[in-house]
Amino acid sequence: DAGVIQSPRHEVTEMGQEVTLRCKPISGHDYLFWYRQTMMRGLELLIYFNNNVPIDDSGMPEDRFSAKMPNASFSTLKIQPSEPRDSAVYFCASGGLGTEAFFGQGTRLTVV
Amino acid sequence: AQSVTQLDSQVPVFEEAPVELRCNYSSSVSVYLFWYVQYPNQGLQLLLKYLSGSTLVKGINGFEAEFNKSQTSFHLRKPSVHISDTAEYFCAVSAPRGAQKLVFGQGTRLTINP
């Protein structure tokens, strides 16, 4: 398996633009997580899905953030409109019941 | 709710010296415990995990950790470090069963000096 695949690896966008981050989890994993990493706040869980259904989105910072998982092999995290304070590394991770979470390489987002 | 405290934000050591990275957690229920490593510009990679059983857990790259329930600690150790161990190390907890919904500590930056 190629592991968790995230795209793009780097994204630079202007304030106010829409940003979409993508994730392909490991096949067979039924949990998918989106984390954000910043110097100030460390690693924060934004939202997680079980069997494509959002279970807990209490970590999503604002209504500007939304996440979807239309099928078992794909998820998106969208920010609209983006702001400079959204600049961070966004990680997607997947896992199965009783297994650890496997992380993607992350997307480094810079909003200017 | 769970929380994790990594007591040292940075740990510098010389090559071939032993190292201990400290982690304490807080939880009202039993927990699963993890150590992840993050190399520069990379994702997080699992070093080791404690789910149950033996309190001494061995992981990859010669690392080990000991779960101490009375002290609510899960310190990471390596008897002899290498330059390639330079990285950020994260301790994390999750509730047992269900999703591995991880709560992370702030991380410890391990720097190995020649």
Image (cartoon, rainbow, N blue to C red):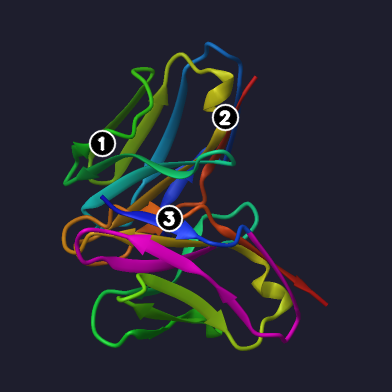
- Given residues B68 and B55, the one toward you in this image is B68
The amino acid on which the numbered mark 3 sits, given as a three-letter code, is Phe
Task: Give the quadrant of the C terminus of chain B.
Answer: bottom right
Write down the residue under mark 2.
Answer: A87
Magenta part of the chain = B10-37
- Point 23% across, 45% down: residue: A72
Q: Is residue B10 above or below residue A72?
A: below
In the drawing, what numbered circle is on residue B10?
none
Secondary element under disc 3, as helix, strand or loop, is strand
**Of marks 2 and 3, the one in the foreground:** 2
Whole-number angstrom distance, CA of label 1 to CA of label 3: 17 Å
Write down the residue under mark 3.
Answer: A103
Write down the residue under mark 1.
Answer: A69
* Chain ID, mark 1: A
Side of B94 relative to A34 (left or right)? left
- Point 21% across, 53% down: residue: A30
